[in-house]
Image: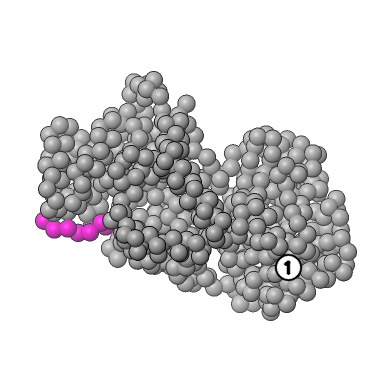
Amino acid sequence: MPGPAQLRDFLRAYLRDHGLRYTLRRSAEKAAQRLLGLGDRVWRRRFPSPEELEEQRKKPPAAGLISVAVPVYNTDPAMLSALLESLSAQTYPDWEAVLYDGAGTRPGTAETLAAAAARDPRFRVFRGEENLGIAGNTNEAFRRCRGEYVALCDHDDLLRPDALWRTAEAIVRERPGMIYSDEDRITENGRHHMDPHDKPDYCPVNLIAANYICHLTVIRRDLLEETGGLRAGFEGSQDHDLFLRAAERTDRIIHLPYTLYSWREVFSSMSHRNLQACLESGCRAVEEHERRAGYVTEAVPVNREIRLWTETPRDATVEALVFGESEEECRAGWQELDFRTAYARLTAALLVTDAEGLYAALNEAAAGSSADYLLLMDASLRGMNRHFIRELMMYAQRPETAAVTPVLTDRRLHITHGGFYLDGGGTPVRCDNEGLFVTAGGDHDAMNRVHNVSAVSVCCALIRREAFRPLDEGYRGGLGMADWCLRQRREKGLFCVFTPHASAVLARGPLLLSGGRADPADKARFQAVYGPEPPDPCHRKSVSAV
């Protein structure tokens, strides 16, 4: 367990980064999960029924042998036994667990491994002559795996009984390069489940900013061999480095929206003992990944996150398409942008229009522009931070990006626009974390990191001119921009990006925000194309077993 000094330092840092109100809210949520068992309730609700597990045992997918690679070093025998029991309970029968013991000295660990191997030949145990560290021990396990697909698993974590069955189902259906699932945490004593992490489908910018994939991760063995496995020198972020290199070699990355993996909150782990070292390793992994992609990037740890600064074209021109209800309003917005950012190659087109004519005005201005980038901007925007345009351009310059949006707040610094997610349930889209204080972070601290979103607001978005295509002029409100983003994703495979490192105040208020305020005609037009509950690949919720 962490000592009082560690807890005090962590609380001070969290309070500094997230503010008092959000810190109190998160503390209450944590207490409720432990004392009221809220995380346990989520776990039980999502856990497959005995009937479903039995049905899985009767009908295993024909995916062949799946190997589970487990590095072992001085593991608590009770925790190791719990992992081995979770493997034995798998409903998919064709698996092997390759357990490589890096010359551990803890009493009971070797005996636990030997007993498992004697009980079930699917447990294949190997012991090294020295401890090679997490990367070396894992690679030794990789080399002994015989399956076409290899699952990564830590020595003290747990798999849900259907984890490998769901994996096998995806292998048969998709033949992917990499598979990952949702997860949660269990307390060190194994009594409580906490913090379910419902992940999006594969989002490349999310993976650059943080290792959101984590576990359960399964990689096709030939792809694993191409990458060379884990690399020494990236301790604490060795998985992040591996996933970045694997993602460079495959576009077949599949997300399983099931909570199949529980990782144990062990306070002696490196992520708890030395978070700074883990972040520094992650920064090196990201810098190398960016260099291989052709970008000059510096990554540094800032407030427990990986912060990127990527070079942008020095001579890139930007034209701001500033729209408002009067020329005076548009000119004031343009002058604010020019003064705040002092971007050298910035021009503006002032579009005096109402909501009904907005998209036609934007289309006409974009068609007549010769700038490299177009900045769609509500004239009421104020208080942009110094490197506002550069921060947006760092991601807008990427060929896989459709548009980039900053975080927009009201005057009290509560979020009004933070990217849109598809909501369903009668409301087409919602602003992510609307109303949250700007530094609070939100679910798994996502609002403090750059990440992919399904749609952005027309109130502020930077777009490469070559990526711009006409907006649907049949819309009056914010759903028109959401439609534009979704068409870019469907037809061109482009992603939208949110960055918290560019910020501004939307002085007018949530103009053109969709959500429950969507124009009824816009809502009908949107749902006629995308349906009442379109899936959102960038904002997924884990599903219960069915």
Vertical placement of residue 37 versus 439, above or below: above
Vertical placement of residue 81 versus 416, above or below: above
Left or right position of 382 against 39:
right
> Which x, y percent locates residue 486?
65, 47
Left or right position of 417 against 360:
left
> Which x, y percent locates residue 449?
52, 59
Was residue 131 drawn as part of the magenta stretch in this picture?
yes
What residue do we see at 36% from left, 32% from top? 162
Give, as a single range, the part of the protein colored magenta. Answer: 129-136
What residue do we see at 41% from left, 28% from top? 48
Q: Residues within 10 Å of mark 1 (few under 14, many from 20)?
A: many
Residue position for label 1: 382
Vertical placement of residue 215 versus 173, above or below: below
Was residue 337 drawn as part of the magenta stretch in this picture?
no
Counting the numbered discs, the total is 1
Which quadrant: the N terminus? bottom left
